[in-house]
Image: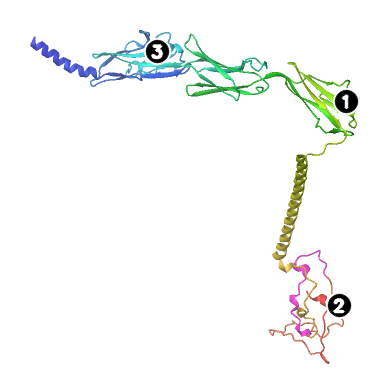
Amino acid sequence: MMTLALVFALMTALLVPVASGQMVKMDSDRSGYVGSQVELRCEFVNSNPPVKISQVTWQKFVNGTKQNVAIANPALGVSVLAPFKERVRFKNPAVRQRTPSLEDTTIIFNNLRLSDEAAYICEYTTFPAGNRESMVNLTVYARPMVQMSLSTPTIVAGSKDLKMTVATCISANGKPPSVITWDTELNGEANTEEIRNTDGTITVRSDYIVVPSRETHQQRLTCISTYNDEQYTDSVSLNIQYEPEVIIEGFDGNWYINRDNVQLTCLADANPAISLFQWRYLNGSMPNSVELRDDTLIFKGPVTYEIAGTYVCDATNSIGTGSASVEVTVSENPLPLSAAERVMGVLGWVVALGVILSLAGIAFLVNKQQRNKQSENDSDSDNSSPGCKKPSSKKKPADDFQSQGRLYDELPNTADYVSYRLACNKDDYMEQHSPPIQPPLTFLPQNPYTQHGTQISTFTYPTPPGPISSYTFPKEQYV
């Protein structure tokens, strides 16, 4: 007996470490949206020496019961059971081979459904270690459909204390439920409720309640639906129908005898638009000088005492009728201007004068700038070609070599005389031609540069006969 007990203890000591070396690795939680795809990871970590994997079984665990989803067996192959057959597969192709490798048996769920939400068990059957398993919780979410609408296409304004629902925002079939808030400048209130559906989703409905009036017409309402970290918004503008609100313009309290061009205009704020304007004169029949043109009363000719009295305008739309009245008085002379009106008149003249002076100053500055620019351009043109300046007709007497007291032998070299037309390419410049010299200068040599052999001729002025007298050349020959 002692020998058997010792052997059993030794075997237990050897087998326990081996058994404790195997484990199944899985994620604790996974999630996905309806219609999407999700992976459920399952890996078997073996010990050394490894154990033999006989089978891997995926099971759905709901309300304490297990339902087989998929099985991988080295001898029998892979099997996916209904209702998962069309939507579940093993991710690792090695699982489906003739000689499979079952260390990684991760499965992929396609087209998730709300009914797929459950705990899933991955169980390994091994020899000689026995069964090893782990579990993952799968959560399936459903994005809601958000819709906003007016309670009715047209809302009719009632009494000032009558509240009613003007708009509704619905976040339908969401899991988890959405949170609905309102963004508006209206002073209303929201009434929100949650409705649980049979498939596990939740529909959230929020009604916005306010007193409809002309002030709420065209006001904007925005519904904000927050789902997880996502936001959906939708907006509408209120269409509130109300009866006309009427005022009469045109009478300024200063209608006097013989004043011209006076009229009364009936202004109405209404939704829908006014369909009929009617004028009434409470002091009898309408004066003969009055002409009715829809919303306007035109008084022909100069003002007389006959047009004084009370005028009433009735404006009608499909909701109701609104009225306004004005008491017209006629004075003998125009009323004097008040202090405020005089001040406003003076200010108007000052503003007008200031505008005129500003425009004149701007025009002067622009003109001056253009003239300065033109002067700079002319100066640059003159400085760019100083040799092409038109000869000036004014000369200083000291610079004129033809002045009295200077002899003809001080003439410069004749090669220095260049025509202004040729130097500046002025084909259109008409040069002035000098008249012939009288008497001709017959004492000048005719061939002063004739050379004889290698000798260089030197030109000298010959001494004319008789007494020497100065000769003045015509100034037209000086350039």
Determine the secondary structure under disc 2: loop
Give the percent coordinates (x, y) of residue 157: 68, 17
Give the percent coordinates (x, y) of residue 379: 72, 63
Q: How far apart are marks 2 and 3 (CA)?
A: 130 Å
CA neighbours of label 1 inside 10 A, class few (<14), some (14 to 19), many (20+): some
Check disc 2 and report the residue beneath it.
436
CA neighbours of label 3 inside 10 A, class few (<14), some (14 to 19), many (20+): some
146 vs 295, left or right, is left
**Residue 339 drawn above or below residue 46:** below
Check disc 3 and report the residue beneath it.
118
| Quarter occupied by residue 440 | bottom right
User: Residue 434: within the magenta?
Assistant: no
Along the line of sight, the residue nearer the viewer: 161 or 39: 161
**Residue 176 drawn above or below residue 65:** below
Q: Distance between the residues labelled 3 and 1?
A: 84 Å
Tell me the kind of residue under disc 3.
Answer: Ala
